[in-house]
Each structure stands twice: as C-alpha cells, then as structure tokens.
Image: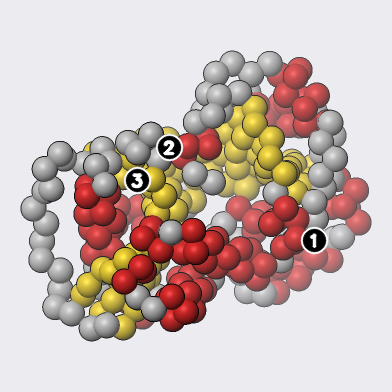
Amino acid sequence: MSWDQLLEPGVAVRDSPLETERFGYSTTRLTIGPGRVDAGRLLATIEGLAADLVVVRYDAARLELAGVFARSGRAVLPAGALTYWEKPLAVAEPSRPTPPPGIEVLTADTMDAEVVSALVQEIVRASFQDYGNHYLANPLLDPSAALAGYQDWAVRSLNANPGNVLVLTDRREPIGLATLESGADAGHLEILLAGLVPAAQGRRLYGSLLDGCERLAAARGARRMVISTQVHNVRVQRAWARQGLRPFAAIETVHLLDRALLLASPGKATDVRCRGVTC
C-alpha cells in the first residue's frame, strides 16, 4: 500500500480481488486516514462488510481504535506495524561515494523485457521468501501465496512502467532490485519493494541500490524519498540510517477475520508452522 493511499482522510474501503483470488478468501482493505473518525460509524462500516477478511491499516498512535475492532464480532489478529522512513533531497544533486568496482544500477527499460521480467520474479523470491509480512499473522493464508503476491506486485510495477524498476548488477549479474512509485503530487518518490539476493547481502551493496533510487528521485525533481518495512525488520532500518534516512510514521495492520472461519480451520495454523516460516 502506498503512502499516498494512507494519507486519504477518513475511512476508505476497497475490495481486493487480487488477494481474494490468491488466498481463496474474499478480502477487503479498510484504511483509516487522518482526521476524526466516529467510532460508531466505523463499527457499523466494519459490521456491514461481507468479506471473509478485512485488512485494516491506520496510524499506530490511534490506540483507541483497538476497542472498536474488538466490538465488531470478528476475530482480531494483530499483524504488525509498518515503519515509514524518509530522506529529504537537495535541489542540487549531492556528491556520493563511488560504487564498488563492477556495481551498476540500471533502469529496467534499458534491459530486455522478457529477461528482466524473469529476473524480477527470481530476485523478489530470493530476497523476500523469509520476509515477516503481515499475512503470516493469519493462519488461514498460505505463506507461499503471499510470496507470489510480492512477485506479482513487482511484475505489475514493471509492466506499468519499466522506468520505475531499478536493477542492481554486479559485473552485469543482477543481484537486487527496487520498484518505485512517484507520489501523487510528484513531491516524493516511494520505494515499494527493495531487496538483494542472499548471496549479495552483508557486503554493503544495499546502499548502492538506495543510492540509485535517490539519484532517480532527484532527477525527477522529488523533494524526498520514502520507504517502509515491518517494524521488526531492524537490519534493513540500520542500512537506511547509514544512508541518511529517518523514521517519520508508523502504521498498524490488523486482520479482522470471520470468527467461524478461524474456528473451523484449526489445522491450518499447524501447516504454516511446519513450512519453517518464521512468524
């Protein structure tokens, strides 16, 4: 979910056909943006939704909303918080360290379309297969389907605009990628997905990928770069701090699940743990 969507005031409800098809449960996204929200109306909105699963996102500071969710009659599954970081960008392009020998960041529109599509899926699979995303909080959802969702998201970004996908290469060998989206007002560039294959991790090459994102953002006239991750993903946040980013927001995620579905499928929670996924 983009930062622009989280800034929409009031309560926004969107059906999610992609997640419905992927997981086999009807899914709706509910976002609570800035501004006053009437608790009674919010509760009525939640109770009026027919979806099996409602994925709710809201400012983590709004602790009073937990009581509204608990009164809804649905099972409430805390699914972790997202932390958002930013880096203001100078008008003039700042000086940056020279990348290590052989390291390049290329836009996908300079590469063969079919080749880069396969690369995007493979890099996302390798770099996100152990990512502790919010879907893992829900015992009804298949973790492998969640990973496929990240791959699909990256490919959709590629197909929509190859110039919004950066590929990090080491002596022409792709080792990482980032998918990007310009803010609605063009004032910021958001990094939606960014990661390196495991063999490239621990070599301080992630900073080169972020540097490529920053260069592109500056070239487009953006005033800041924005990125997010699950709050428990401390390792990547340390890399962001080294790159000069700083935290500015935290967004809570909650799954509101049809209680009957949860109680009728106790075995699926065991299935998830047996896959070796770290929840």
Mark before the other along the chain sequence, 3 or 1: 1
Which quadrant holds residue 213? bottom left
Q: Position of residue 210 (x, y in %)?
A: 28, 58
Dot 2: few (<14), some (14–19), or many (≥20) neighbours within 10 Å?
few
Q: Position of residue 125 (x, y in %)?
A: 52, 73
SS at mark 3?
A: strand
Residue at image location 67% in from the left, 75% down from the top: 275
Q: Which residue is mark 2?
A: 184
Query: Which is more foreground, mark 2 or mark 1?
Result: 2
Residue at image location 11% in from the left, 56% down from the top: 96
Q: Which residue is mark 1?
A: 24
SS at mark 1?
A: loop
Mark before the other along the chain sequence, 2 or 1: 1
Q: Position of residue 271 (x, y in %)?
A: 76, 71
Q: Which mark is residue 81?
A: none
Q: Which residue is mark 3?
A: 189
Dot 1: few (<14), some (14–19), or many (≥20) neighbours within 10 Å?
few
Q: Is residue 103 above or below residue 54?
A: below
Three-letter amino acid code of the residue under disc 3? Leu
Q: Position of residue 17 (x, y in %)?
A: 72, 53
